[in-house]
Amino acid sequence: MTALILALVAGAVIGLALGGLGGGGSVLAVPALIYLLHFTPAQATTASLLIVTLTSVTALTAHARDGNVAWRTGLLFAAAGIAPAIIAGAAAGHLPEALLTGAFAVIAALAALRMLQPAPTEPSGQVHPGKAGAAGAGLGAVTGILGVGGGFLAVPALVNVLGLTMRRAVGTSLLVITINSLAALGARAGTGIQLDWAVIAPFTAAAILGAWDGKRLSRKIKDGTLQRVFAHVLLAVAAFMLVDVLV
């Protein structure tokens, strides 16, 4: 199977997950780029940032049109993550490949376990500035070093720490992810990491188109079913990556 076909298929599957789950689907982008398309971990995390940024902007536009983005809250939350995203993004290209792969596997496993837990409770209305800053900084660091959007981390934080409703948290998380991803990309611009645009472009296009289909698919499947299936797939991928690093 050619790299182009693999890129289109992988992008479509990840887009379906993104659209169907509203977040977390981009975690599959890095292992797909490493094991199917033979990117190095540094190349895969950088390419994933591009994919995450463009798909997040697309989804953010739709949520903004529906009035589900808390702009001021999202910008303040993202501001705490910009510096960590830049620092982590610049450092990522200098880390050993095994360390990057292993760290990503751990984050993927945590994302899967987060998806298997009950949804965050509705907000109490009490905002904790210190916790909000810490959560924003942590999300920025994860985005910068591992190239994932971090929606599985952002949404619970926006609900439980900043008091947003679930619907507005999902939309606002896309704003935060877009800003953090752009900051991390900027930090990686001078690291000399070479990317195969002939693979990344169709991969990204397929992911964006797949996200729209995923949104429609989610309406036809029983609540929680798609998320549980994806979480188990993600756990299997994380286990495979850890074995690959350790063996």
Image (cartoon, rainbow, N blue to C red):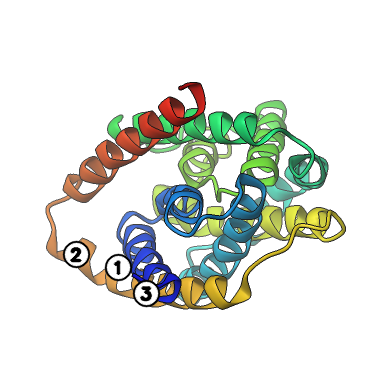
Where, by quadrant of the figure, is residue 71 drawn? bottom right
Quarter of the figure that contains the N terminus: bottom left
Residue visible at 33% across and 33% down?
235
Question: How far across and how far down the image is residue 202, in percent?
Answer: 48, 78
Question: How far across and how far down the image is residue 150, in percent?
Answer: 54, 45
Left or right side of 110 for 131: right
Residue visible at 44% across and 70% down?
3
Residue 72 visible in this rendered orientation of the protein:
no
Question: How far across and how far down the image is residue 19, in percent?
Answer: 35, 64
Along the viewing direction, whichever of 215 and 50 lies nearer the viewer? 50
Residue for badge 2: 219
Residue visible at 38% across and 56% down?
22
Q: CA distance from mark 1 to mark 3?
A: 23 Å
Task: Determine the residue located farthest toward the top in the rendered image.
Answer: 246
Q: Are marks 1 and 3 in contact (CB under 8 Å)?
A: no
User: Count of labels shown?
Assistant: 3
Where, by quadrant of the figure, is residue 94 drawn? top right
Identified by mark 1, the residue type is Lys
Along the viewing direction, whichever of 93 and 231 lies nearer the viewer? 93
Residue for badge 3: 5
Identified by mark 2, the residue type is Arg
Q: CA distance from mark 1 to mark 2?
A: 7 Å
The residue mark sitting in front, 1 or 3, is 3
* Mark seen at residue 215: 1
Per the image, label 3 sits on a secondary structure element best described as helix
77 w.r.t. 206: above or below: above
Q: What crowding class fits label 1: few (fewer than 14 Cα within 10 Å), some (14-19), or many (20 or more)?
A: some
Along the viewing direction, whichever of 170 and 207 lies nearer the viewer? 207
Identified by mark 3, the residue type is Ile
**Mark before the other along the chain sequence, 3 or 2:** 3
* Mark seen at residue 127: none
Q: What crowding class fits label 3: few (fewer than 14 Cα within 10 Å), some (14-19), or many (20 or more)?
A: few
